[in-house]
Amino acid sequence: MAADPSRVISNLRELAALTSDENGAQRVAFTPTWQKARDWFAGKLSGLPVGRHRDAAGNVWLTLPGESPRSLVLGSHLDSVPNGGWLDGALGVLTALEVLRSIAEDCNGRPPFTLRLVDWADEEGARFGRSLFGSSAFAGKDSIAADRLRSDRDGITLEAALDENGIEIDRIGDASAEQENIAAYLELHIEQGPVLERLGLPLATVLGTKGVERHAITFRGQEAHSGSTPMQDRRDALAAAARLALEIYTIAGRHKDAVCTMGSVKTFPGIVTAVVGRCECTLDQRDLSPDVLAQMYREAIEASERFASQQGCTVEWSRIWSIEPIPFHPKLIALCRESIEEIAPGCPSLPSGPLHDAAEVARAGIPTVMMFTQSLGGISHNKVEDSSEEHLGLAVAAFDRLARKTLTWLGQE
Ligand SMILES: [Zn+2]
């Protein structure tokens, strides 16, 4: 029997009713409401022949032992941002549960390969500003030293919050032991953007997560009196920055899925009667291709130097953060596309702008793919986040096929 979408949707509604208030979902990681969601989820396992354990980083694993210890993992996250939506993360976990249940039934409780489900801890990083906590510990890419001092709005440190949840900060790296025998990882998630709605399509194959180049840029000119300084004598740092803010549209516009954002601009002295002597701004550039990312970065530097010199200014760059693009597995991308085409013909392939737990799994060298389902209005991290029941149903059906095709592929490898 194929997975039953109506059970997924009714579980999602039950979870939302249990863990939301009038402002939306409140399943923030390491809080009592998150624990309530996890306890509720554990209660959904009765009658399933699965083992359940929590790893050293607080990720929860279900295991349905198969003929072979090599395993297929399905997963996502039950945690949410404060005032979040009902589908972000929860759709992936509850669909994974339904697919696991239906495959267990079809195989009389013993599939050819071991089937596992993971509920990653603190994907959102909403409380401590550190996203992908559990999956990065699993991937062995955690940075405990830097994270130890993080604290929430009330001054509670990450270390104290973990301790309260029975997680020892010095041991979270032990979660990487879970990598043993994992042959593939699949994740269903809402798109959280407007592309599928614009295309009028329900589902997409995700090609990977975009790399990010994030920089601070400072233009320096000369502060001068706004009344007495003729226009041709000005060294206006804001004028140079403003030209760059427009140029990034041309730079990103040469590539199909590239994005560039100048998200912050500060002017000094920042008063109405002075020409701007110093302008500090930020630039965030993203693309799935490392070559495109490197080219856009180079072009932005060249443009900033050109505009600086035309305005009589200087410019300095310093890197805030960067991450390489993480492409998903070609065979799993093909299986994902095939599964979608069988259920809802017309399957676009998109890169993901946001990072996801799947990116950390792929970074650990495990063959990985994600499937996206349409977000109404492209809105997420908001209580109005929604997808149509029809599309959720197609998503469950297509993800079920993807899991079964992946098991068949593992048998052929
Ligand atoms: Zn999510």
Image: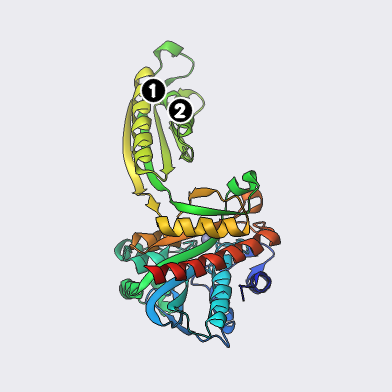
Question: Sequence order check: which comes first, mark 2 or mark 1?
Answer: 2
Crowd band around label 2 with a 10 angstrom C-alpha radius: few (<14), some (14–19), many (20+)? some
> Can residue 92 be seen in this snapshot?
yes
Which of the 4 image quadrants contains residue 38? bottom right
Residue 275 position in % (x across, y down):
44, 22
State whether residue 72 is above or below residue 362.
below
State whether residue 352 is above or below residue 134.
above
Q: How far is mark 2 from mark 1, CA to CA? A: 10 Å
> Can residue 36 be seen in this snapshot?
no
Query: Residue 200 vs residue 330: left or right?
Result: right
Crowd band around label 1 with a 10 angstrom C-alpha radius: few (<14), some (14–19), many (20+)? many
Q: Quadrant of the N terminus?
A: bottom right
- Residue ID for mark 1: 307
Q: Pick whichever, 397 or 376, lies toward us.
A: 397
**Three-letter residue code for mark 1:** Phe
At a point 43% along the width and 42% down the height, the residue shown is 284
Q: Is mark 1 within 8 Å of ligand 1?
A: no
Say if mark 2 contacts mark 1, CB within 8 Å: yes
Residue 208 position in % (x across, y down):
43, 53
Residue 193 position in % (x across, y down):
57, 49
At a point 39% along the width and 73% down the height, the residue shown is 57
**Three-letter residue code for mark 2:** Glu
Q: Is mark 2 within 8 Å of ligand 1?
A: no
Front position among marks 2 and 1 = 2
Task: Describe the element under mark 2 as helix, strand or loop.
Answer: helix
- Residue ID for mark 2: 247
